[in-house]
Image (tube, rainbow, N blue to C red):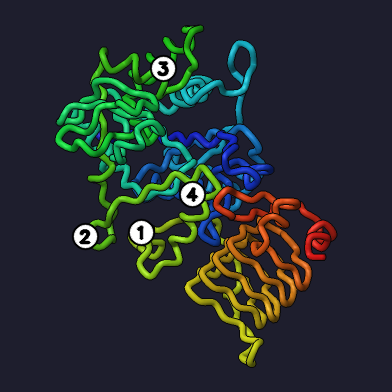
Amino acid sequence: MQLRVLGIVLAGGKGTRLYPLTKERAKPAVPFGGKYRIIDFVLSNFINSGVYSIYVLTQFRSQSLLQHLSEGWQFGGLLKNQFIIPVPAQMRSADESWYQGTADAIFQNINLVEQAEPHLVVIFGADHIYRMNIASMIEFHQHKSAQVTVAAIPVERRLADQFGVIEARSDGRILRFHEKNPQAPTIPGDPKRVYASMGNYIFSTRALIRELQADAANDASSHDFGRDILPSLVSRAEVYAYDFQLNRIPGEVDGGIPYWRDVGTIDAYYEANMDLRSVSPALNLYNREWPLRTTGFPDPPAKFTFDDENRRGQAIDSIIAGGTILSGGVVRNSVIGRHVRVHAGVLVEDSIILDNCNIGRRSKIRRTILDKNIRVPEDTTIGYDLEHDRRFYHVTESGIVVVEGNRSAVAVATVAV
């Protein structure tokens, strides 16, 4: 019997901690690594793992996300069981409300599950940067004859108050959940770490439909998998934790150390991007056996022009996306998006520059994130005087400056004075 697997991606979160990058876009649509979007990671994991039937549930500020999906991912393939289809919030609840929680998001689209008639439903979030061979998790689920399997990642015990922690037996059978409890039990045989839920689940279809219907009828529920359905289910069903540390990606040296990052804050997002510049980054974007897929724009190659003293187009320890031109400017330790223009005398250091930005001559930018389409006038300095920058931009406690999108050239020019 061929196993039928339906993938559902939860891509409707607001991503408030990533503000202002999420001011006009959903978190899964936030650019990453020069040419990708955060949602590309979960979708690539699905496709590379052989899961080809995928619904993407959207909600808040979804226009940018929907545009990216329509441009970068094929919809409605020739085969019935091969598709990636975005599903805007249908408001199928009795009071026609937005999704009230992760479980409610699936319940309001339960007709899609019933129509597909899968054996398994794989429910993953779209908020994290990670590589995962989901086929290994499915194999574990089948081997354990589980009704539910929860992806779990070991984290240091001191971080237990930041996660939903799983208490499990040595064989992976989940005993209970502890929501952000600093005293949560550690991993069996590992007193220094706890299992943190990654928010990624595999459900046997019958169990999923049964629990969603029961939860929807419970007025006291917050209609969330982690808070409601799973804690109530562990005493009544076979619920297992899948250790993400055991996951291996084809094409990686020795299988590679599993990579997962929560990029929920500006600082975490910045550090994850900066890691890509390393000689041997923890996240390998160059593995042809496990490609990271995204929109295939017809971009020309990046170009570096001029080789004169004090006017040399060059990039050092940086990532430069297609269509970008460094015209006598210097980029160092940075991630540069598509179709960026860096003019003569410019110095960009330790920064993330998103698509279509234009940085005027002699400007200096340091530890800064420029959102898409920013026009920086000549002789502008950003990231050197944080007190000054706080008057006009968003600045994190660690000193990362974020220049938000839709800012006019006049407003930026005012800062440059």
Q: Earlier in the sequence, mark 1 or mark 2?
A: 2
**Mark 4 sits on what residue?**
268
> Helix, strand or loop at disc 4?
helix
Q: Earlier in the sequence, mark 1 or mark 3?
A: 3
Amino acid under disc 1 = Ala
Q: Position of residue 20 (x, y in %)?
A: 65, 45
Q: Residues within 10 Å of mark 1 (few under 14, many from 20)?
A: some
> Helix, strand or loop at disc 2?
helix
Q: Which mark is residue 107?
A: none
Could you tell me how far apart the alpha carbons at marks 1 and 2 are, in whole angstroms?
13 Å
At 74% from the left edge and 68% from the top edge, which residue is drawn? 380
Amino acid under disc 2 = Asp
Q: Residues within 10 Å of mark 3 (few under 14, many from 20)?
A: some
Mark in the foreground, 4 or 3: 4
The correct choice, above or below, for 26 with respect to 410 in the image is above
Q: Earlier in the sequence, mark 2 or mark 4?
A: 2
The correct choice, above or below, for 386 with respect to 237 in the image is below
Answer with the quarter of the image where residue 366 lies. bottom right
Q: Position of residue 166 (x, y in %)?
A: 29, 28
Query: Disc 2, disc 4: CB below 8 Å?
Result: no
**Mark 3 sits on what residue?**
228
Q: Is residue 363 left or right of residue 135?
A: right
Q: Earlier in the sequence, mark 1 or mark 4?
A: 4
> Helix, strand or loop at disc 1?
loop
At 42% from the left edge and 10% from the top edge, which residue is drawn? 214
At 31% from the left edge and 25% from the top edge, which residue is drawn? 204
Q: Tell which of 63 and 283 is nearer to you.
A: 283
**Residue 119 in sight here:** no
Q: Is residue 249 left or right of residue 408?
A: left
**Residue 7 in sight here:** yes
**Mark 1 sits on what residue?**
282
**Mark 2 sits on what residue?**
254
